[in-house]
Image (cartoon, helix red, strand yellow):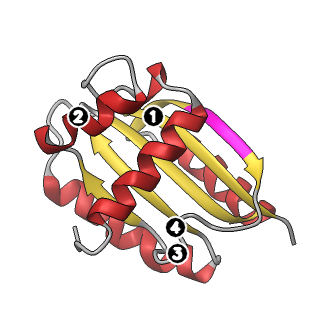
């Protein structure tokens, strides 16, 4: 089995995103990802999702296909897809973080501005941003 890393962005369709909606997405994904040996991280801000999925090629591809058909969001766009030797997010079946003003400078480090928009970032920048976020906020259960 080949280990792959897929990073994608999407836009949430809801006019107002509730914390409970996002919590529900997280609660469902953790056991599903565990069952399929998928690890990763999901961040949300400015109505955008940025997610990294790591695991076996078939499992990751199958999950991304399901995600891309989910009607809660649109414009699912793969920013990076690569084979990898080591998981960046092996600690979590799915780490979740809602972005706040606190992360503005970190976002600026990897993008054009301090405003989170993963469509304006390279796949490599997204992976580095997610890695730094996981290192800084990795012990918090959100």
Image quadrant in which you'd find residue 138:
bottom left
Which label's residue is closer to the chain start, 3 or 2? Answer: 3
Residue 117 shown in magenta: no
> Residue 31: x, y in percent?
47, 80
* Marks 2 and 4 in Cβ contact (< 8 Å): no
Reading the image, the residue beneath label 3 is: 32
Residue 25 in sight here: no
Whichever of labels 2 and 1 marks the residue nearer the N terminus, that label is 1
Residue 27 on image: x %, y %: 33, 72
Label 2 SS = helix
Mark 2 neighbour density, 10 Å: few (under 14) some (14–19) many (20 or more): few
Of the numbered discs 2 and 4, the one sitting upstream in the chain is 4
Q: Which residue is mark 2?
A: 105
**What residue sits 87% from the left and 72% below the top?**
1
Q: Nearer the viewer, mark 2 or mark 1?
A: 2
Q: Residue at x 85, y 66 (%)?
A: 2
Instruction: Specify which label sits upstream in the sequence, 3 or 1.
Output: 1
Residue picked out by circle 4: 89
| Residues drawn in magenta | 77-81
Cα–Cα span, label 3 and label 4:
16 Å
Q: Which mark is residue 97?
A: none
Residue 35 in the image: above or below residue 3: below
Q: What residue would you read off at disc 1? A: 10
Measure the alpha-carbon separation of dots 2 and 4.
22 Å
The answer to which of marks 1 and 4 sits earlier in the sequence is: 1
Total marks shown come to: 4
């Amino acid at each position: 089995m080949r280990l792959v890393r897929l990073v994608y962005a999407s836009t949430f369709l809801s006019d107002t995103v509730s914390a409970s909606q996002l919590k529900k997405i997280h609660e469902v994904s953790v056991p599903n990802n565990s069952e399929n040996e998928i690890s990763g991280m999901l961040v949300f801000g400015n109505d955008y999702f940025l997610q990294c999925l790591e695991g076996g090629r078939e499992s990751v591809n199958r999950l991304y296909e399901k995600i891309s058909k989910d009607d809660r969001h649109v414009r699912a766009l793969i920013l990076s897809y690569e084979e990898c030797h080591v998981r960046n997010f092996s600690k979590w079946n799915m780490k979740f973080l809602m972005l706040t003003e606190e992360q503005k400078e970190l976002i600026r480090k990897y993008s054009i501005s301090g405003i989170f928009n993963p469509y304006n970032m390279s796949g490599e920048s997204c992976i580095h941003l997610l890695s730094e976020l996981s290192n800084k906020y990795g012990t918090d259960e959100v």
